[in-house]
Amino acid sequence: MELLDGKYWSNAILDEIKSELADIKGKISPDIGLAVIVVGDDPASKVYVKNKISACEKVGITSKLYTFPTEYTQTELISLIQKLNKDSNTAGILVQLPLPKQISEKAILETISPQKDVDGFSPYQVGLLSIGEKSLVPCTPKGIMVLLKKYNIPICGAHAVVIGRSNIVGKPISNLLIQENATVTICHTKTRNLTDITLTADIIIVATGKPKLLTADMVKDGSIVVDVGINRINGKLQGDVDFEAVKDKCSYITPVPGGVGPMTIAMLMSNTLEAYKRQNGIS
Ligand code: NAD
């Protein structure tokens, strides 16, 4: 068994982005800015945002953090995003999800300029991804694909089973795997005989938010397991895979923490750089 070391590759990618940015900076005038907007006080969001801001500092992206109380209104948020859409020093806009109940996620994602949508959640970017056109790909699925490629995992013709069908992980990773010619099965809460399906998988991606959902009896020998889950159990991070039991059956597996999470952050920096380059006509 070999670990798919997201921490290592994330750092390597951040170093590459840092040197590319240093090369571009100074040659053109707009700042490379990422606006990060947080509404409410979700504890997990605070941790994610802290990590995103610190990655910006590491690579040389100017982050601007906007934090608002839970009562902040949809109208106020839309008007801030419209202002940032027009700001040439803001290359990327990220609204941390989840949002408080009074704010429609859909309305917010539709307001972010598709060119600045570094999370890749807006309908326009989702549409581009689903027809296989160049797009700003959601960071977690993009990070998983980069990680698989770093280890030369064969994807073409492989049977990939994705457990979870969310808009931010399950659906986009399924699309990316199809584009790389995998045969993809998407499973969810209503899937019957999940174990029968996972036992036929060459690659299993688990994104459910259910600790230790994937157990050793669900995995065939030599398979590749990617654990997207982040669950906080008694102050410790736990994935959706029963890592200790599953690891010996796998050829490759991601740890939690240190697998998909750091890759997600690196891809946010990559998307911000990509958005900046496109907005400024740099190829
Ligand atoms: P979600 O709640 O939006 O979706 C979960 C999906 O899992 C649903 O489609 C549901 O049908 C499926 N599911 C739930 N229980 C199941 C079961 N028993 N059997 C089969 N399918 C089941 O979650 P999400 O936003 O996709 O996130 C999933 C997990 O990944 C969470 O733990 C989240 O914190 C984590 N996450 C991690 C990163 C990262 O960077 N590592 C990024 C995004 C999400």
Image (cartoon, rainbow, N blue to C red):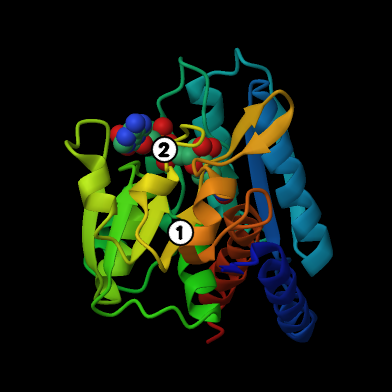
Q: Name the residue under label 1.
A: 225
Query: Within the displayed image, which quadrant is ligand 1 positioned in?
Result: top left
The three-letter code of the residue at mark 1 reads Val
| Residue found at x 72% / y 76% | 12
Alpha carbon of mark 1 to alpha carbon of mark 2: how far? 14 Å
Q: Is residue 122 visible?
A: no
| Residue found at x 75% / y 52% | 63
Q: Name the residue under label 2.
A: 208
Q: Quadrant of the N terminus?
A: bottom right
Would you place residue 22 above or below residue 172 in this image?
below
Residue 76 on image: x %, y %: 56, 25
Foreground disc of the pair 1, 2: 1
Would you place residue 34 above or below residue 45 in this image?
below
> Which numbered disc flags the more N-terminal residue, 1 or 2?
2
Would you place residue 166 above or below residue 140 in this image?
above
Residue 196 on image: x %, y %: 21, 48
Q: What element carries label 1?
A: strand
Q: Does the residue labelled 2 lie within 8 Å of ligand 1?
A: yes
Do callouts 1 and 2 mark residues in contact (Cβ within 8 Å)?
no
Q: Can residue 70 be seen in this view?
A: yes
The three-letter code of the residue at mark 2 reads Thr
Residue 110 on image: x %, y %: 37, 42
Q: How many labels does the image show?
A: 2
Q: Is mark 2 on a helix, strand or loop?
A: loop
